[in-house]
Amino acid sequence: MRIQLDFITFNTSYNPNHKPILLSSPFGSKMVAENNNNKEVTLSASMENNMKGTNVHLEVHQKEPALVKPESETRKGLYFLSNLDQNIAVIVRTIYCFKSEERGNEEAVQVIKKALSQVLVHYYPLAGRLTISPEGKLTVDCTGEGVVFVEAEANCKMDEIGDITKPDPETLGKLVYDVVDAKNILEIPPVTAQVTKFKCGGFVLGLCMNHCMFDGIGAMEFVNSWGQVARGLPLTTPPFSDRTILSARNPPKIENLHQEFEEIEDKSNINSLYNKEPTLYRSFCFDPEKIKKLKIQATENSESLLGNACTSFEALSAFVWRARTKSLKMLCDQKTKLLFAVDGRAKFEPQLPKGYFGNGIVLTNSICEAGELTEKPLSFAVGLVREAIKMVTDGYMRSAIDYFEVTRARPSLSSTLLITTWSRLGFHTTDFGWGEPVLSGPVALPEKEVTLFLSHGEQRRSINVLLGLPASAMDVFQEQFLQI
Ligand SMILES: COc1cc(/C=C/C(=O)SCCNC(=O)CCNC(=O)[C@H](O)C(C)(C)COP(=O)(O)OP(=O)(O)OC[C@H]2O[C@@H](n3cnc4c(N)ncnc43)[C@H](O)[C@@H]2OP(=O)(O)O)ccc1O
């Protein structure tokens, strides 16, 4: 029973009525709901950072939510979620902006809604509701109730939304639908969708999806399949739905240290710094030239790395971890943790089937003292990142699954940087018949410890690093970025 309570308590923080972490905490919100009875609602927010530099007051009028059910009868009953799914039951909000010269937005709602009912036949658990199984675990009750779908209209043109390459929940939050009055995540459907039509003929698809249903690769495959159905095409990657292939072993065997769960003491009072100063959110663009320079710096002064190229991820994550640690002025003996997700699909033995629709990612970590990290050359941090990647084997992932089975612990974010990399996720290829999105991305960063890597620019060869830091620390981080 303790397990259940922990789980529900943790996730209540995502309840929109309890100042959810994703929407409200770091950014604050000037959102005004003129009506919250789950019927028609007008949301408004002032935008000052729009692309045209004018001050636009975005108003989004949401119609009454509807339920989109699978087009034909689908399997009913409880649907197993693995421990990799259970461990990560948080809401991820994303938007996809479409604008076609050839096609207006008149049919957008109808086309996207119909395609949703068709794709749900393949992805039937998404039409169900989260519940707790008799064993006390998060599971899906495949009720076929349907995805919550909202049609909305904005009072402006799409290019007045602002710079969505930087998450901005105050504005972008109007473009996704949050269930009103949910007391915990069990009361939030696994997926909600909103289509907002703009005055220019463009539209935005806003999605709220629970991470327990899919990881980045799974989410991308779902959204792309939905687009294929909308264009009358067969699915290139039908989902593989049986998650019991990632069941815990019986009896569980914990064979690794799993320091991802270690709670580190905040000796440097980082939390009070965050409380004292406003948190600034910035996006740093690493273009191919900057990545090349960083890769050279990342292998300098190292016998083991010298002459060995490192990857963009290794160089970037090492740089961000080290620069953030310096910026936050962590004490020399302060332990600091790096956490990041590794796609385990090809590393499981046997590897996960193509189209595996649940979470195939595992968090890996590295811990060291801040003094060592910041005083040693960048190549030291690169070495730690590389070791953390190497640590992820079939044995490590099965041990992580079993660890969660026994402890129900969640990874700790104290004195931690959590990097989540979306740079190779093909959300930009989603096409519902209006071409690829002109822009796509997250609505917000979920926690102050999270940094997001997103692809950007020409041929998507640049990487945008999004992060939030207390104002004084952000200046120091920026200086280090400019010195590359
Ligand atoms: C719920 O609704 C959602 C959810 C979400 C999003 C959720 C998530 O964020 S889940 C986490 C998503 N992230 C991952 O799954 C990470 C995947 N990446 C890895 O696992 C990587 O292996 C790594 C651990 C990060 C390490 O990466 P790296 O050091 O770069 O090593 P490799 O990947 O092996 O690359 C080395 C080298 O190979 C070439 N290469 C690899 N892949 C590609 C590619 N796709 N295209 C081209 N080239 C490739 C390349 O040369 C690499 O070297 P570079 O120096 O060029 O990088 C969202 C939305 C929702 O609704």
Image (cartoon, rainbow, N blue to C red):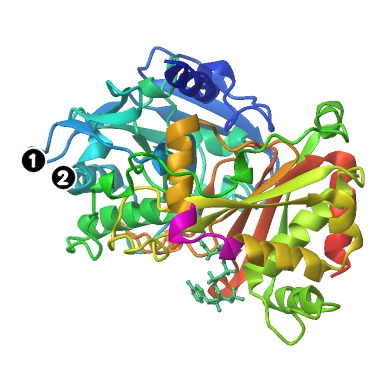
Query: Quadrant of the image for the C terminus?
Result: bottom right
Crowding at mark 1 (Cα within 10 Å: few <14, some 14-19, many 20+): few
Left or right of 29 on screen, residue 143: left
Circle 1/circle 2 CB separation < 8 Å:
yes
Q: Which of the 4 image quarters holds residue 133?
A: top left
Ligand 1 has an atom within 8 Å of the beta carbon of the residue at disc 1: no
Per the rendered image, the range of residues in magenta is: 389-396
What is the number of the mark on residue 72?
1
**Residue drawn where x is 23% and y is 48% of the image:** 242
Q: Secondary structure at mark 2?
A: helix
**Left or right: 473, with 8 as reference point:** right
Q: Secondary structure at mark 1?
A: loop
Considering every residue shown, the one lying at the far bottom of the view is 307
Residue 200 seen by the camera:
no
Left or right: 326 in relation to 220: right
Three-letter residue code for mark 2: Val
Residue wearing tag 2: 121
The residue at the point 69 percent across, 44 percent down is: 54
User: What number is the disc on residue 439?
Assistant: none
Q: Report the front residue among 40 and 83.
A: 83
The residue shown at (32%, 58%) is: 224
Tell me the quadrant of the picture where the N terminus can be found: top left
For residue 56, above or below residue 353: above
Give the main secondary structure, helix, strand or loop, of the magenta stretch.
Answer: helix
In the image, residue 431 lies at what x, y percent?
34, 60
Pinpoint residue 386: horizontal percent, then vertical percent.
65, 67
Few, some or many residues within 10 Å of mark 2 (<14, 14–19, 20+): some
For the question of whether residue 125 can be seen, the reply is: yes
Which quadrant of the figure has residue 29?
top right
